Image (cartoon, rainbow, N blue to C red):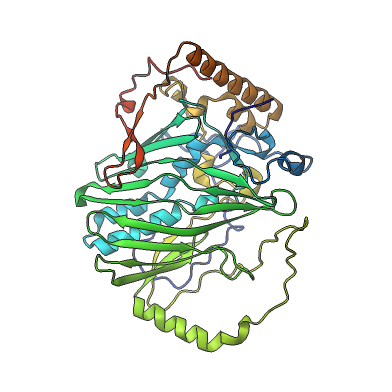
């Protein structure tokens, strides 16, 4: 069948730290769970779940190559992807994972120096991609008009996201502080290609952060993401490319280099960069790994440390034997170089990743934050917009481990979406988005999707019937 589905796809202050080693495997599983993974009420407060209703199903009997061999070099925007490749979240929910480390924005709001604020914004930009570590499942493609709301009063923000375009697939989001400290918004258009052994996601769309009390606006674009070994071997992910964060109010910039793996894996997961003032003078150097932590240090200290490293280990680079063949069916093995970041004396820790639960590998490698995103708290279905992806039957079925129902529902929803599009074409009607409108980003001048407002007034009478 010819389908038009898209393929999407712990708070630390500014204190010094001796190590950023985190034992992910030893993270404790905590929480009082019911039989379907939800948590009980504790003193009248709902505890978010820390597991899913059912573990991840096995993909061992699914032949990825049988499906993907026809897709080499193609943009995967009009290809129906098998549900076996999915994780039980919508791409709109995946976007909301940017908010996992919102405390970094709150910290930035309290700082009086703009360079210090830029450091925290840079840490937030790095932390926003950290949840992708080992997340090899594909989120469900949002249906046109699908929405997702996330309200976290304990963390001081609320977010609304909407699928605003089907071709190209564009997801828009808008988050705001509950006490008017910040607004965080943007639109994402992930352009994906399959290259034989890997799938590469090119980031499209601008991310904007406004620190309202400081009258500052920051913009940036996410790095590239690549999933290796989609056919043979163990799946692994790397992020690479240059991320430039611009403070449009002061002219300061932070330039972050997400390093590709490299020949011997020495650069795997590494992030390095610097903050410069409007005269292009380096003010701080940032370094770390997007899977672990980010540090800041004075440029002179960083350069001295680099020189000392070169002196002590300069000749260790002459390894010429490589087993990498230029083609063939061999897996691109993930390098074994996994040592944690070595802190340069005099550095300050900006951000460190929170440990994942011990059972994460059986739960699509979700973080605790991701585990809670599709949870329906008691009575929530009565106040959510009818387009909210928590109400999607295919995602709910997959979350319960019912893959057959999930697949059937996914096909039904896709056909319903196609039928609605045919009806609009027959009646010569265009699609009208409910919560976002197309316009120009006032800070970059580029095309963007801007929040109309009004979602949290709870007036959902004219929402489309998409499920």
Is residue 452 depicted above or below 230 in this figure? above
Q: Position of residue 138 (x, y in %)?
A: 60, 41
Check the picture and name the quadrant holding the N terminus. Answer: top right
Q: Position of residue 394 (x, y in %)?
A: 61, 26
Q: Position of residue 71 (x, y in %)?
A: 68, 41
Quadrant in which residue 452 is drawn: top left
Check the image and name the residue furthest to the bottom. 311
Q: Residue at x 30, y 67 (%)?
A: 276
Quadrant in which residue 72 is drawn: top right
Left or right? Give the position of 104 relative to 372. left
Left or right? Give the position of 404 relative to 90. right
Q: Residue at x 42, y 70 (%)?
A: 17
State whether residue 152 appears in this view. no
Closer-to-camera residue (110/189):
189
Left or right? Give the position of 387 relative to 394. left
Is residue 57 depicted above or below 317 in this figure? above
Closer-to-camera residue (449/381):
449
Is residue 383 depicted above or below 213 in this figure? above
Q: Residue at x 51, y 89 (%)?
A: 311
State whether residue 113 appears in this view. yes
Q: Position of residue 25 (x, y in %)?
A: 62, 57
Instruction: Please count the marks in the image.
Output: 0
């Amino acid at each position: 069948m010819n389908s038009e589905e898209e393929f999407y796809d712990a708070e630390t202050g500014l204190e010094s730290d001796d190590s950023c080693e985190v034992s992910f495997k030893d993270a404790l599983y905590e929480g009082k769970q019911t039989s379907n993974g939800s948590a009980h009420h504790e003193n009248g407060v709902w505890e978010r779940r820390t597991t899913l209703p059912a573990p991840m199903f096995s993909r061992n009997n699914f032949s990825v190559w049988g499906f993907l061999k026809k897709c080499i070099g193609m943009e995967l925007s009009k290809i129906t992807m098998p549900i076996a490749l999915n994780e039980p979240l919508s791409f709109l929910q995946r976007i909301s994972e940017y908010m996992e480390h919102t405390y970094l924005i709150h910290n930035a709001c309290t700082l009086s120096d703009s360079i210090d604020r830029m450091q925290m914004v840079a840490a937030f930009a790095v932390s926003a991609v950290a949840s992708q570590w080992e997340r090899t499942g594909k989120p469900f493609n949002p249906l046109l008009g699908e929405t997702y709301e996330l309200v976290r009063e304990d963390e001081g923000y609320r977010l609304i996201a909407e699928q605003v375009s089907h071709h190209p697939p564009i997801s828009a989001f808008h988050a705001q502080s509950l006490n008017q400290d910040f607004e965080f918004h943007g639109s994402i258009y992930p352009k994906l290609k399959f290259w034989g052994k890997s799938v590469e996601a090119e980031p499209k769309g601008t991310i904007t952060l406004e620190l309202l009390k400081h009258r500052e606006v920051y913009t940036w674009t996410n790095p590239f993401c690549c999933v290796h070994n989609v056919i043979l071997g163990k799946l692994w992910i790397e992020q690479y490319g240059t991320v430039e964060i611009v403070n449009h109010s002061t002219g300061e910039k932070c330039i972050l280099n997400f390093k590709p793996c490299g020949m011997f894996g020495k650069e795997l997961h590494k992030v390095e960069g610097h903050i410069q003032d409007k005269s292009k003078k380096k003010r701080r150097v940032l370094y770390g790994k997007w899977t672990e932590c980010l540090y800041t240090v004075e440029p002179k200290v960083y350069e001295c440390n680099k020189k000392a490293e070169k002196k002590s280990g300069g000749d260790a680079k002459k390894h010429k034997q490589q087993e990498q063949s230029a083609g063939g069916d061999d897996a691109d093995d993930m390098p074994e170089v996994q040592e944690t970041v070595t802190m340069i004396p005099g550095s300050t820790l900006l951000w460190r990743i929170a440990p994942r639960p011990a059972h994460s590998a059986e739960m699509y490698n979700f973080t605790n934050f991701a585990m809670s995103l599709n949870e329906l708290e008691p009575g929530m279905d009565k106040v959510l917009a009818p387009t909210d992806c928590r109400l999607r039957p295919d995602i709910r079925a997959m979350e319960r481990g019912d893959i057959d129902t999930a697949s059937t529902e996914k096909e039904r929803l896709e056909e319903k979406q196609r039928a609605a599009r045919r009806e609009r074409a027959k009646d010569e009607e265009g699609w009208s988005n409910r919560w976002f409108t197309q316009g120009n980003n006032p800070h970059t001048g580029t095309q963007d999707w801007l929040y109309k407002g009004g979602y949290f007034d709870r007036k959902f009478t004219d929402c489309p019937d998409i499920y």
